[in-house]
């Protein structure tokens, strides 16, 4: 029966308590609101686990700012939830000043045409 499994989960660490999709959405929303420049990626800034995430980090590093990243590989709820949150099917995903910017291709394009620099400068001004 399901009752026995749910009671045993109380003794596990918080990491294992099943989050509802609604919980995950709220958690993502809070991250987006709290971090002016936020990257959902595979791996960490120092050790990206995919080429696209690596490119995203390299681009953000050119702006010389302290951006926040979330490793979706270590958080499966976020990995699924962020795709629904943004209505965007792939990782990495960049948020600037609470707005979803896009994935790697969009970041490259906006990096090249200067739009991303403008957005980030605005976000940096808000960070102070």
Image: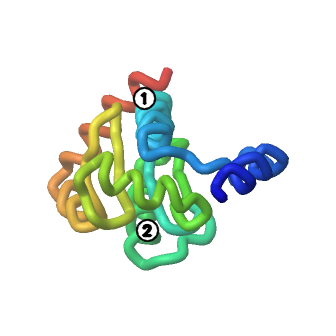
Quadrant of the image containing the N terminus: bottom right
Q: Please tell me how many numbered marks the rendered image carries.
A: 2
Task: Determine which quarter of the picture holds residue 110.
Answer: bottom left
Any mark on residue 53, and which? Answer: 2
Residue mark closest to the camera, 1 vs 2: 1
Q: Position of residue 5 (x, y in %)?
A: 71, 56
Q: Residue at x 31, y 66 (%)?
A: 90
Name the mark on residue 123: none
How far is the residue under mark 1 from the one under mark 2? Answer: 21 Å
Q: Residue at x 43, y 68 (%)?
A: 53
Q: Earlier in the sequence, mark 1 or mark 2?
A: 1
Number of residues whose C-alpha sits closer than 10 Å to that of mark 1, classed few (under 14), some (14–19) or many (20 or more): some
Q: Is residue 72 above or below residue 36?
A: below
Asked whether the viewer can see residue 111, the reply is: no
Element on which disc 1 rests: helix
The extreme front residue here reads 1
- The spot of residue 101 in percent (x, y) is 25, 47
Q: Position of residue 81 (x, y in %)?
A: 40, 52
Q: Identify the residue position indicated by label 1 in the image.
A: 33
Instruction: Say which of 48 and 42 sits in front.
Output: 42
């Amino acid at each position: 029966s399901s009752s026995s499994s749910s009671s045993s989960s109380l003794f596990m660490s918080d990491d294992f308590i099943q989050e509802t999709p609604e919980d995950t959405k709220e958690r993502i929303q809070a991250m987006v609101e709290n971090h002016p420049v936020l990257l959902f990626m595979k791996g960490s800034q120092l050790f990206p686990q995919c080429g696209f995430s690596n490119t995203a980090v390299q681009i953000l590093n050119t702006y010389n700012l302290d951006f926040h990243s979330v490793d979706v590989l270590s958080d499966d709820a976020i990995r699924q939830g962020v795709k629904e949150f943004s209505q965007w099917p792939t990782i990495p995903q960049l948020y600037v000043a609470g707005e979803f910017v896009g994935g790697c291709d969009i970041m490259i394009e906006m990096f090249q045409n200067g739009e991303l620099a403008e957005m980030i400068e605005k976000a940096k001004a808000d960070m102070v």
